Image (cartoon, grey):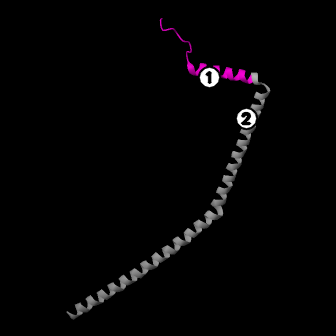
Amino acid sequence: MSSSSSAANDFSTDARRVADQAAASTSRVADDAQEELARLRGQVERLMQERVTPALAGAADQVSDYANRARETIEDQAESFAETVRERPLLAVGIAVAAGYLVGRLMGGNTYVYPRGR
């Protein structure tokens, strides 16, 4: 039985050695994966700072420019309309009455009032 006991000890030793090697290998792979993730995270952060942030800033500037132009156009049109009303108040009142009448007819349907007695 000494040879089987020796074989069992050799097997146990080999198994421990393989387990230790597997643990060391797993640890190296985990460390390598963490290093790679850290490197990729750094690259993503750098790309965000170099490319995405300036692009968003440029788009925000462009949207702000469009909004300012639209606001200026609306203000100019409102000022022009107010000037026309000041120059020709009776015409403005006549147009407002006609527009109100048309809107009332379109939205009111039948506007005649019938007496209840019929």
Q: Which residue is mark 1?
A: 103
Q: Which residue is mark 2?
A: 78
Q: Residue furthest right?
A: 87
Question: For mark 1, does the 10 Å Cα neighbourhood hold few (<14), some (14 to 19), or many (20 or more) residues?
Answer: few
Residue stretch in magenta: 91-118
For residue 16: magenta?
A: no
Q: Position of residue 89 (x, y in %)?
A: 76, 24
In the drawing, does residue 91 fall left or right of residue 35? right
Q: Can you tell which mark lies on residue 91?
A: none
N-term mark: 1 or 2: 2
Residue type of the residue flagged with mark 1: Val
Where, by quadrant of the figure, is residue 88 drawn?
top right
Where, by quadrant of the figure, is residue 85 drawn?
top right
Measured along the vertical axis of the image, is residue 83 above or below residue 98? Answer: below
Where, by quadrant of the figure, is residue 11 drawn?
bottom left
Residue type of the residue flagged with mark 2: Ala
> Secondary structure beneath disc 1?
helix
For residue 92: magenta?
A: yes
Q: Looking at the magenta stretch, what is its main secondary structure? A: helix
Alpha carbon separation for disc pair 1 and 2: 22 Å
Q: Position of residue 62 (x, y in %)?
A: 69, 50
In the drawing, does residue 60 fall left or right of residue 29? right
Q: Position of residue 51 (x, y in %)?
A: 65, 61
Q: Residue at x 75, y 35 (%)?
A: 79
> Secondary structure beneath disc 2?
helix
Q: Residue at x 73, y 39 (%)?
A: 75
